[in-house]
Image (cartoon, rainbow, N blue to C red):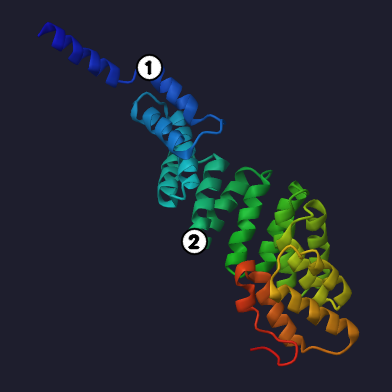
Amino acid sequence: MKHIGGLVVLSLLLASPSRADWKRDLKQCESQADISPDQRIQYCTSALDSGKLKVDAQAMALKFRAFAYSGKQDYDHAIQDCTQSINLNSNDAETFGIRGSAYLDKGDYDHTIQDLNEAVRLNTSDPSVFFSLAAAYSGKGDYDLAIKNYGEAIQLDPNWPEALWRRGFLWIMQGNPTAAAKDLSEAVRQKPDYSDAIMNLAWAHFLGGDFAAAQTDLSRLSIYPDPAVLLFLAHARAGQDGRGVGEQCNKDGFERLARADHQSLSRQFKCRFTVGCG
């Protein structure tokens, strides 16, 4: 019985985290190491459940666990942890940024903008916050503020082809193909195989009346053997030769071409050279 009792006591001791255990777990929770979201959640939860953390450490552990939940696309838990963290420390820009990004992924643009503006107030040097703000404004259809915030992100990080591509696309939506071509050309210069930027650069050149440039742009996409791309090349060539293709037909068709994924282009691109848009 004593031996069994000893085993019971020993098992209880092994099951109870020691002081060293919670310190280790907190360190792993906050680590910059490349660990899986599930591992980080486990470490952060263990540290939080230890009852040993002071307020600032609790706020930090909740923030890192929220970051891990976001990595698992569990945005509700991420938002919940961020809210608890903010209640403990309302001066951490990263926590507002994580919660704002989670709201963005849920399509809640108003809460995204509210949180990310607070993150900017606390720290104006993080380009990713401006990038996410721009995405939220774009989602709401406020392209002017979206362009402004993409501009802030690009100013802080000029070598960000995705930000240039997104702003270039919005310039197209705003009817400014010249500004669009400038951004998209720089995006392609930075990332020569950036097919989305090349596609939209061709669109900008087309809308600006430079059919030869549009054709040259799209010829770089020959790795995608899609008939819709070849069809647009024919449209560009027709415009260049002066044979004329209906402006709205081409705009409608190319919008579909620019937005669609390559797998579904041939189904979505209905504009035909001789019969118009279907």
Q: Relative to the observer, which residue lies in front, 170 or 114?
A: 170
Q: Residue furthest front?
A: 225
Quadrant where the N terminus sits is top left
Q: Amino acid at mark 1?
A: Arg
Question: Relative to 78, is 11 on the left or the right?
Answer: left
Q: Amino acid at mark 2?
A: Asp
Q: Residue at x 74, y 50 (%)?
A: 160
Residue to which mark 1 is pinned: 19
Element marked by disc 1: helix
Visible residue check, residue 210:
no
Q: Residue at x 80, y 80 (%)?
A: 234
Visible residue check, residue 216:
yes
Residue 145's x, y, as percent? 67, 63
Element marked by disc 2: loop
Q: Bin the neighbour count of mark 1 within 10 Å (Cα to Cα): few under 14, some 14-19, many 20 and up.
A: few
Residue to which mark 2 is pinned: 108
Q: Relative to the observer, which residue lies in front, 24 or 226?
A: 226
Badge 1 or badge 2: first in the primary sequence: 1
Q: In this picture, is 37 found above or below 25?
A: below
Q: Residue at x 56, y 47 (%)?
A: 97
Q: Relative to the observer, which residue lies in front, 105 or 155?
A: 105
Residue 155's x, y, as percent? 77, 50
Q: In this picture, is 247 found above or below 2?
A: below
How far apart, in angstroms, are the residues tagged by discs 1 and 2?
41 Å
Question: Relative to 118, is 4 on the left or the right?
Answer: left
Q: Bin the neighbour count of mark 2 within 10 Å (Cα to Cα): few under 14, some 14-19, many 20 and up.
A: some
Residue 168's x, y, as percent? 75, 64
Residue 261's x, y, as percent? 62, 67
Quadrant where the C terminus sits is bottom right
